[in-house]
Image: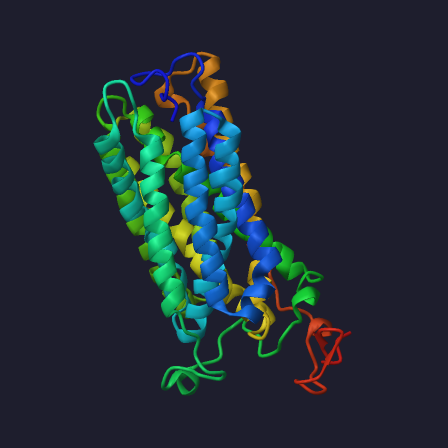
Amino acid sequence: MTRLIGITRPAPGDWKLTQLGWIFSLAIFILGTSAALLGRWVEEGGPRKAMFTAAWCFGDGFLVSALGVHLHQLWIIYLGYGFIGGIGLGLGYISPVSTLIKWFPDRPGMAIMGFGGAAFIAAPLSVWLMTRFSTPSHIGVGETLVVLGLIYLCFMMVGAAIVRVPAPGWAPAGYVASAQPKPLVTTQHVYVYDALRTPQFWLIWWILCLNVTAGIGVLSQASAMSQEMFGGRITAVAASGLVGLFSLFNMGGRFAWSSISDYIGRKNTYFLFFALGTLLYALVPYAGSVGSVGLFVLCYAIIFSMYGGGFATVPAYLRDMFGTRYVGAIHGLLLTAWSMAGIFGPVLVNYIRQYNITHGVARAQAYNVTMYVMAALLIIGFICNVFVRFVHERFHMRAVHADVEVEGAPVFGRQ
């Protein structure tokens, strides 16, 4: 999209990478905002309505973006993929996650695994479609967006049609009997809005925000970064393959790390994320300086596994802190951390890169400072994780009658 006019290289009138980065940032910001605002509607109205709405918003976001490419109007793409598509992303994220957690309470990582694995299909499919639609005088971005929008709309509609929720109180056979008490896991419940008054919510908010900021910044530019750091050795096709590989680690990390957290605890799992992530981000500039593609790929494969693992582990972290009754709604509120990270991460990567290039730094070294900044953010996240403790009992719900509600809030003798 930086060569829509110039075709082979950017020309006057083409968009800069810093401008295009805001498409992704806006979409992620709206994802978290819509999840926070509409999370309770998803829980009360059921997943089918939410998935139906998500399908139309996400599909239409691609079609509107295609119009923006055709007219060469960036604000239309902001509106299409960023705003309308972002709403579809938010609803399309929390509705299956909430539903699958109900079906698989013993395997919460499975619920979020599919979201991370999508790039394994989407990245090479997008490159193939653009190849099919491109000509010597035209890049097939607009047509690709149309086809992708229609494909996503159809598949998401199928999902909305067949989705079901389990009966109240349903659990896998043996799940309750096999559950064992674990450290830092509460047996109490915290009301959704009381959770906002606890330091634990805001510590976990920053933990998620910092972990995602570091990951999403490189995720949004993984293809361009790999090509620039290893100019001539990694082509656009090879870069799309790397994005697909990283998406596999993103997906696998959601399952593997969440499963590991069941044994070592969520807090210890995040300690691993931050400690190992700091080391890996600091190693990336070294990999570029010695020209080691293998070390670069290894670092980012593990980084993306922890990026995905952070998303899969945080619902269980919230469940451990605040109980199960309102964990879905609390999770929706926490996703505002993803919204902010969706701005911080790409902005840090894109603007620091542009600043370095403007001041004469070679493209292969333009990301070095950013990697050290990401490592520093993870150190701050490590410190936040240190201070996570049990939620004080004054925030616990004390049931008077579980079925009685006053002005929409259950009566639990809340303080």
Q: Residue at x 40, y 34 (%)?
A: 66
Q: Residue at x 48, y 13 (%)?
A: 359
Residue 288, placed above or below residue 397? above
Percent coordinates x, y for residue 112 in the rendering: 40, 60
Residue 48, placed above or below residue 271? below
Look at the image and tell me whether residue 332 can be seen: yes
Look at the image and tell me whether residue 367 can be seen: no
**In-image side of 264 versus 138 (left or right):** right
Residue 50, placed above or below residue 341? below
Residue 320, placed above or below residue 297? below
Q: Residue at x 55, y 74 (%)?
A: 324
Percent coordinates x, y for residue 201 in the rendering: 63, 59
Task: Specify how the rendered protein is coloured.
Answer: rainbow
Considering depth in this image, is 130 or 287 the residue closer to the camera? 130
Which corner quadrant holds the N terminus? top left
Considering depth in this image, is 104 or 323 the residue closer to the camera? 104
Which corner quadrant holds the C terminus? bottom right
Percent coordinates x, y for residue 342 in the rendering: 51, 42
Percent coordinates x, y for residue 122 in the rendering: 30, 45
Considering depth in this image, is 373 or 60 the residue closer to the camera? 60
